[in-house]
Amino acid sequence: MNSPDTTVQQAKREHTRTGMSKDAFQRDLLDNLFYIQGRFREVATPHDLYMAAAYTTRDRLLARWVKSAQTFKATHARTVCYLSAEYLLGPHLASNLVNLGITETARAAAEELGMDMDALIEEEEEPGLGNGGLGRLAACFMESLATCQIPAIGYGIRYEFGIFKQAIEDGWQVEKGDNWLRNGNPWEIPRPKISFAVGFGGHTESYRDERSQVRLRWQPAFEIRGVAYDTPILGYGSQNVNLLRLWKAEASESLDLQAFNTGDYYGAVHAKIEAETLSKVLYPNDEPEAGKELRLKQQYFLVSCSMQDMIRLHLNTVGPLEGFADKFTVQLNDTHPALAVAELMRLLLDRHAMTWEEAWGITHKTFCYTNHTLLPEALETWPVSLFERLLPRHLEIIYEINRRFLDEVRMRFLGDEARVRRMSLIAEGHERRVRMAHLAVVGSHAVNGVAKLHSYLVKAMLFKDFAELWPERFHNVTNGVTPRRFVVVANPRLAKLITETCGQDDWIRDLEQLRALEPHVDDAGLQGRWQEVKRAAKQDLAQWMKQATGIELDPESMFDVQAKRIHEYKRQHLKVLHIVRCYQRIKQGQVQGLVPRTFIFGGKAAPGYFMAKLIIKLINAVAEVVNNDPQVNDWIRVAFMPDFNVKNGQRLYPAAELSEQISLAGKEASGTGNMKFSMNGALTIGTLDGANIEIREAVGPENFFLFGLTAEEVLQRQMTGYRPWEYYQNDPELKSDLDLINSGLFSHGDTQLFRPLTDNLINHDPFMVLADYRAYLECQEQVDRIYRDPERWTRMSILNVARIGYFSSDRAIREYAERIWQVGPQPVLDTEH
Ligand code: NBY
């Protein structure tokens, strides 16, 4: 330990080297440019300057990070471990500057050196280690955990290639590899000494331990290693820094040596390459793809490294493992890490010689599980045969969990074998499969959905049998998003206006304080500035779009935005039908009541999802015709923003005026984009789905554009038989819109191109686009009507922001902490004191 004297000296040294003053920042910026990039000002590239700025920022957060680690160690703090196969982090620099509270200092320091901070921020390649909402939620939660001062470790995979980059060629989505590490990653610190062996294949065997007890163990056929890479996650308005620990796969050394000894040099190198494929690439599907062996290997790799790391930490700090569940609470982000249940059992049974009862008691107390989807086809299952081959010991453990669990079911529900079959961890069929969701529910003491409606449907439908057996296990925690990234970083003008109107910036860490805006809602001064802020953001987006796509947007028109993964249940094609309707009406001269609009889409389709890719093509095909038709051009334009990711999202949310949340009721678990738009003053047009319901309640039904079937009506229609062709035949406008698409107008005469889509809508329409078409159009007319009254619109926009505080991820994290994790804050004290 340092004597008080050296601590003071260290603090002084820190202050001159990494102090928060402008001068210190400037000095360090030039130092880092020289010592890390080996460059001086005159020859530095924008990337060199970005790296220098990133290291300069990192230097300033290291003291907090170390202090956090010391504090948590000294206080034996109970720790949340968030287990997620995905973290959609977005760029770090701007958000770390905000959370350090030095945005303005850094900007001024850079400016004096003739550097433009915004240009440096633009340089950063974002780590796109996730597909969509689920991965972004994990990133928001990590930030809020630090802000709420809750000690946490996020465990994940350090994919070398994140979600693909999307280009649009001839209107089609084209995927390009996302080599995000190419230019180095200044935000991570490799920990080569923190690494674990992960086995695959082989067999299990019994043996006698030193007390002559018969025990089981697994002899894997091969092993690879997982090496830790740590990224600090800063809280806002707190000194707490949490750890994001991502695992990279490497060849295990023992394997290398063996190959060398037999003279198989090539084989040794080959084995290394093979091992490294494990963390090579993120699977780009936002719903599971059946039976991909590498995906199961990734899941086990994540889970095994993480559980071994927790056990190591526990043994190093607390000691014997009996109290494991008091030290750690582990949240499973969907079923992707559900194997952790079997892995912890294996480690406790086989490595730490516990009895089944002891091990199960701990395991069950440790885990909690969040479900993110109701779509039955999206529930993960794995063939038993694949398990047998890859994870034979885990399969045995899962069978034993199942045997004991089904006995409990039989005892509770005498003679109900149908129920036993429904609840089993193993789905019987021509191929037996392991149901990962059932493993997660049985292995956890808390299960939650991500919005009220979703959690209700989880209990009433998806896990009905389980909710009957264990009603106390089921919870709701409605999602949230971090206002730091999605307001302060993304929309600094709005943040400034809010702070000035409220007279303070406490809203940034206590979002309910946005309510202080409400008394000013009718203030003409505020309304005017509110409109200016929106206008400026629209101009920024227009400028970006022009340079990125060549498409000119008119900032005078309404910006109507749908940005999210492309999926049939999210119904981007319903939006297209609305555009086609506008187009036809304008062509026919029916422009009364219409408001000029710019329709903006953003989103990626899973590379193997044909229909989603065809929807992208359709959007771009309609855009091409609409944007090149001078007769309609003053009224409507269509733009597809390529490569929607966190960075591009940050351009979109501030500029949006209308947010499209139009999924079929009952299909969107929560949605989080809906919250980001509303937080930036967009009004929502949406169905009663996911968190839309709660957003509407919060902002007031009069400040929300509602349309469409309810979840209950959807179920009813499905039961009584839904006949989409009746809508097609009975609604002449709908018929004419679909027919126009089939006419070849949007496809240079090709009448077949969009057939798979239109035929599917007319004959099957699994997401009831046609049933909601008319209600949607009528609701859009209402939107136009209100938009023509700017004062009224602005008032609604201000009220949306004033009442959106509930949807901060800080609130969500506090609910998890209290109701699910039973963990409290552990403040880290300021190092300066
Ligand atoms: O999780 C989303 C839900 O659709 C959305 O409603 C919710 O707001 C959000 C956060 O709770 N789900 C999602 O994003 N899912 C995935 O990205 C995903 C990724 C991979 C796989 C499955 C789902 N997979 O099986 O590989």
Image (cartoon, rainbow, N blue to C red):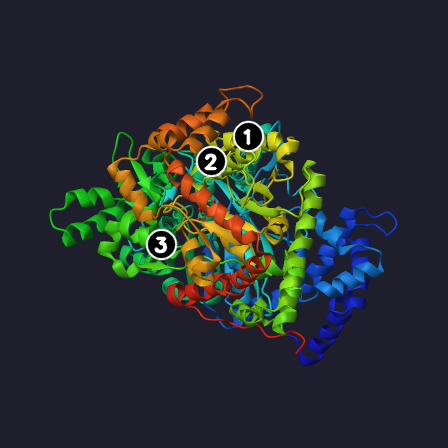
**Can residue 674 be seen in the rendering of this structure?**
yes
Give left or right: position of 817 versus 437. Answer: right
Q: Quadrant of residue 429?
A: top left
Q: Where the N terminus falls, by quadrant? A: bottom right
Residue found at x 48% / y 24%: 742
In space, the residues marked 2 and 1 are separated at their CA atoms by: 30 Å
Name the residue carrying label 2.
294
Q: Quadrant of residue 163?
A: top right
- The front one of 16 and 644 is 644
Give left or right: position of 416 versus 256. Answer: left
Residue found at x 51% / y 29%: 614
Residue density around tag 1, few if under 14, some if 14–19, many if 20 or more, within 10 Å: many
Above or below, 148 relative to 685: below
- The kind of secondary structure element at disc 2 is helix
Give the x, y percent position of residue 716. Answer: 27, 43
Residue density around tag 2, few if under 14, some if 14–19, many if 20 or more, within 10 Å: few
Give left or right: position of 340 versus 620. Answer: left
Residue density around tag 3, few if under 14, some if 14–19, many if 20 or more, within 10 Å: many
Above or below, 756 relative to 491: above
Name the residue carrying label 3.
453
Give the x, y percent position of residue 723. Answer: 31, 32
Give the x, y percent position of residue 492. Answer: 66, 60
In space, the residues marked 3 and 1 are separated at their CA atoms by: 33 Å
Instruction: Give the residue type at disc 3.
Output: Leu
Above or below, 244 relative to 236: above
Name the residue carrying label 1.
617
In space, the residues marked 2 and 3 are separated at their CA atoms by: 34 Å
Instruction: Give the residue type at disc 1.
Output: Lys
Question: Of marks 2 and 1, which one's residue comes earlier in the chain?
Answer: 2
Give left or right: position of 13 versus 653. Answer: right
Q: Nearer the viewer, mark 2 or mark 1?
A: 1
